[in-house]
Image: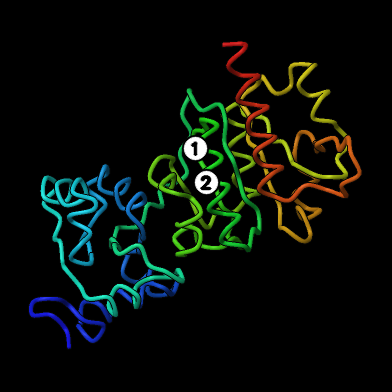
Amino acid sequence: MASPGLLTAQSVRIKQARRLATRAFRRKSGRFLVEGPQAVREALEHRELVIEVYAEPDVAGRHRDLRDLAGAAGVAWFEVNRAAIEALSETVTSQGVVAVCSLVNVELELRPTTKLVAAGVQVRDPGNVGTLIRTADAAGADAVVLSTESVDPHNPKAVRASVGSIFHVPITTDVDIHEAVKAWREHGLQVLAADGYGASDLDTCIDDGTLAKPTVWLFGNEAHGLPDNINSVVDHSVKVPIYGRAESLNLATAAAVCLYASARAQRRTG
């Protein structure tokens, strides 16, 4: 039996929130789910994005700051039973708190101060998208761009993999990469493709000063890399050198190596 006052999995609010697991309903409603204390905490730091929070009764005691942040932001806080929180959760063991937030997608915007952008092209794995966002945030990138064929960054797995970084860096989705390349060039950014078979070498690009320039890095599909029609329009196709016997690096690792190489080079030159 449910405790008095607790929302259950059959509550209208919970049923509506559950629908946010689908991309179609996220787009229709303009909302998405954020799960776990750390991610919800990051969301509440951007109070204008949080619509409501659902939590098990003991969460307010274990994470008092969450309730305080929600109260300060005027965000509705609903206590729910275990079945309700599990209905909203995408993890095997829920951490007891889920927030409903407004989508973070913004229009593609380039400023004179833009120096580093991470772009995912046809990236289909939500974990990779979330990790790309987290890595871009950590490297100090100015924006993350995702092509029209890439997975939704508001997918629950992508949100979880971003570990709150989805709220730290501007994200633009459904971007026509060919049009974006034109815009980037007009604003003085070079476009580099991360490609295991690239004609240029990351070490050389570091040594010759290429990475010190304002840069957009393109990272392609996990299985097939970047399409030929994209590779043909970039300034340089760059491979990360493999010094050992590994066949290749996965997308997330390659992105970390490339973004940090650019960030370091740019900071060294001011």
Q: Quadrant of the N terminus?
A: bottom left
Question: Residue sitting at 61 percent across and 19 percent down?
Answer: 266
Decide if residue 88 is on the left or right side of residue 76: right
Amino acid type indicated by mark 2: Ile
- The residue pinned by badge 1 equals 137
| Element type where label 2 sits in the image | helix
The reply, left or right, for residue 127 in relation to residue 199 is left
Mark 1 packing: few (<14 Cα in 10 Å), some, or many (20+)?
A: many
| Residue 110 vertical position relative to residue 84 in the rendered view, above or below | above
Determine whether 50 is above or below 238 in the image.
Answer: below
- What is the x, y in percent for residue 199? 89, 36
159 over 24 or under it: above or below: above
Tell me the SS state at disc 1: helix
Given the current orientation, which residue lies at the most extreme left position?
4
Q: Are marks 1 and 2 in contact (CB under 8 Å)?
A: yes
Residue 20, image x, y percentages: 36, 72
Q: Quadrant of residue 245?
A: top right
Residue 242 lies left or right of residue 210; in this view the side is right
The residue pinned by badge 2 equals: 133
Most extreme residue toward the top is 269
Q: Which mark is residue 164?
A: none
Above-or-below relation of 48 to 19 = above
Q: Position of residue 26 (x, y in %)?
A: 38, 69
Q: Position of residue 23 (x, y in %)?
A: 45, 71
For this rendering, which residue is in front, 264 or 246?
Answer: 246
The part of the image, by quadrant, that contains residue 55 is bottom left
Mark 2 Cα shell of 10 Å, populated few (<14), some (14-19), many (≥20): many
Quarter of the image for residue 117 reads: top right
Residue nearer the viewer, 234 or 4:
4
